[in-house]
Each structure stands twice: as C-alpha cells, then as structure tokens.
Image: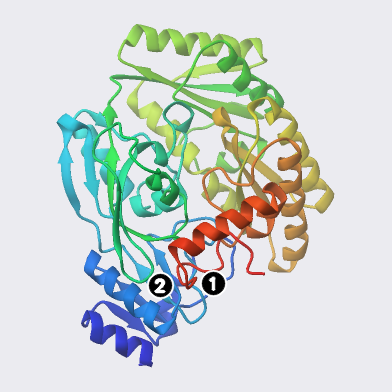
Amino acid sequence: MNELHRDLESLLGAGKVLGGDDEALAPWARDESHCTPVAPAAVVLAASRADVEAVLRYAAEKRVPVTPCGARTGKSGGSIPAPGGIALSLERMDRVLAFEPDDGVIVVEPGVITGRVMELAEEAGLFYPPDPNSWEMCTIGGNVAENAGGPRALKYGVTRDYVLGLEAVLAGGEVIRTGRRTVKGVAGYDLTSLLVGSEGTLAVITEITLRLVPLPREVRTALCVFADAQAAARTVAAVLRAGILPRTLELFDDQAIAACADSGPFRFPAGAGAAILAETDGDDGEAVMGALVRLGEIAVEQGALEVLVAQSAAQRRDLWATRRQVSSALKARFPRKISEDVVVPRSRIPEAIERFKAIGREHGFPVATYGHAGDGNLHTNVLFRDAVEAPAVEACLSALMRATLELGGTISGEHGVGLAKRAFLPWEQAPGLIALQRRLKAAFDPLGLLNPGKIFSSD
C-alpha cells in the first residue's frame, strides 16, 4: 500500500479506496476510446459529496491530479487518469434525490444511469429526450461532462438543454450551486452551461437538476432504403427543407448495413446500399403518421428503393436494436476501429461521405459513416485489423479532421475532445479563443489538478 492509498483510506475509511494492484485498478485505466490506458495511483469510490470534498482538499494540499469518472463509456479518453493521479469514481453516487412531476424536474446524483431517468420520467408521463447510444449503462454525470447527444437531438436537443442546475465541487473542495429548479432564469452568468461539456476540467459535479418535458403520445417509425449513401444524405436536407421536423433521421451507409447483416435483429432488403431510420412523434396520431408518410414520399423522390413502416412495437424495437448495434457489429468484422463524431452542415453531408471514403481509400482503410444525419453529426469509423497499422490510421484521422473543417464542420459533436482530439482543437479554434479558455480553466482550477491534459494540448 503506497502513501497515497494510506492517506486516502485514512481520510475516507476502508472500502472506498483501491490501490497498489494493477489488475484491480485496470478498469479505471481506460474508457471506450483508442487512447492508451493509464493506471491511476489510486481509485476513490466516492459515496457522497463529502467524500468528493475531502478528496479534492487532500489533492490540493498534496498537489495530486484528480480525474473524475463514471461508467467510463466515453470515446475521447476524457476519463483516463493522469499518471500518478487519483481516479475519482462517482458510480456509487447513484441516488434519485427528488422527483417532482408537476414541475417537470428530477434531481439526481451523477452516478444514476441515464436509462433509469428515462424510465422514471416515462412512468409519470414525462420524457427525458437525450439518448446516447450507451443509455443503458452510461451515467448522467458522464452525459453532463461531455454534453451527450443521441438520435433524438435533431428535434429535442442535447444534454445541456435539459440541465437546469448543478451542485459541483471546485478544486480545493469548495462547493458551489449553479442554475435553478425553475424552467426559466437568467440571473448572473450561465455557469451551468459552462460546466456542462467541460469534461471534468473545471469542477466535479455531485448533483444534477434535470428538466423533463411531456411524453409524446404517438411515435411512428420507418426505414427508407436507398441504393447509395448519396441519395440517403440528400434526403435529410430535403425532408427538413419541406418543413418536417422528425424526431430522428439516422443514417446507415454500406459498411454499416453490411456489418449488421449477420447480427442485427432487422434484415435489410437485398440491394440496400444505405438507409435512413426516421421517426416522427407528437400527440395527434393522424398528424404524426401524416408527417411520416410525407417524409417517405420525399425519400422516394430522392431515390429511395422502398420505405418500410414499422407495423408494431416489436418491429420498431428491432429497427432500433439494429441501429444501436452498428458499432459493435463493425467491431466484430474489424477487430480494431476508431469512431469519430464529427459534424458538418447538413447540406454538405453527401460531400462529406464521399470525401471520407476517398480519404480511407487513400490511406488503405475502409471507412464507415453512420449516425445522426439529421443534425449533421456523423459517426465516421476508420476500420482496421492490426495495431501495426496505427501510424497510418492516425494519418487517416488527421485527414478526416481536416476535411471536416474544410466543409465548415467541427471535430466533435458529442464525444468531447479529451485526449483523443486535443491536437486537432487548434485547427478549429483561434489561438486567442484557446487562450481565453485556458484562463477560464485557471480561474476554476488554479493548480491545474482537475483532469489535467484534457481538451488542450499540454505544451
């Protein structure tokens, strides 16, 4: 047992601190990104805000870096610990503190699983729209840290749009409360929105107040099948141009469809080279179905081979289960892959898909592009088989990021910058803007101990 482990156990009590054994620490050394794992010197399994305060006070006194983490399902390396640092796990802080349906508010600790919030809301006739692909295992705290999105972001927005207020602990142990429990409020700077998406670099969030909305009573789902991704991508802009705002417009390219051919519960028709999973919702069943029919007509005008409308809840579940399995299905075909979450203007999606595949061919890798086409958020995956290909893969990723920015896009729509994309941030943002963000970081964390090395290059 090292000195850090002894100190923390003395501070917090037995059962809340892990250290010394690399095997025991291994789960906290990595996330779901391609970044190199780093074992922490110790893991703290915080059970309360008091534990978080104590750890941050100790870390400031001893100058030890602290990396907050939850379920570690992130894709950007944001929860990988700093060498010699503490992994501050919030998984045990999983209580629902208050649920007020009449106000449309739920207050939770950061370790609450996102799917649980969805279920509680729906049982009361309410709706928590953000739906990251890992909603059955990811935590609300992680969603807030990364400002997570999901398929329904097209119509309903991302996590930030549902966070009313936060309780957080600053580096050094000071507790702050930002925001409110009311739907409206503009008193002072919007520090809540600043903390959402800050990737654990400004404070450790210990309580989250979320806004809930009425649950749509009607949902209709369809799959539009195309011969190629270009026609599918053109359909996205055409649908929105026609004044239809679907709940989702999810794109599958040829690689995504091929990967799902053997594993997904839904079987794509022969000849499918691309598809769009579309969904409309609302309270008037006739209007919801009417919007879906018009969407299907537009898809046919743009070249859809057929439009399949889900006729039952089971069919709808199969379509969505297939969509949510795309990433794992691709990994089953290609032992290694890197999944990016770039965003381009919707009008540039056809060009983006074509350029991404051309970049892949140039570097010798298949590239799959799928995901939230409705808001331009594309999950572009570089697919490869062996670690020795890593240098060429990095060159391919760099080219993909350059192309994204040339198309007027951004390097991250929902995964965050973390370690994985910090080298690309200066390509997107001017030096003065990055310098301003560094000054904000220093104001919240003067010693630079909270999740150091993330977002900004450590130059």
Q: What residue sits 41% from the left and 78% below the top?
A: 25
In the image: residue 436, left or right of residue 281: right
Q: What residue sits 47% from the left and 54% below the top?
A: 198
Image vertical order of residue 19 relative to residue 124, above or below: below
Q: What residue sits 46% from the left and 33% below the top?
A: 153
* Residue 92 on image: x %, y %: 26, 64
Image vertical order of residue 177 relative to residue 252, above or below: below
Callout 2–callout 1 Cβ contact below 8 Å: no
Mark 1 residue element: loop
Camera-near label (2 vs 1) is: 2
Figure quadrant of the C terminus: bottom right
Numbered tag placed on residue 204 in the rendering: none
Question: Badge 1 is on which residue?
Answer: 37
Image vertical order of residue 267 relative to residue 448, above or below: above
- Nearest to N terminus: mark 2 or mark 1: 1
Confirm whether residue 32 shows in the render: no
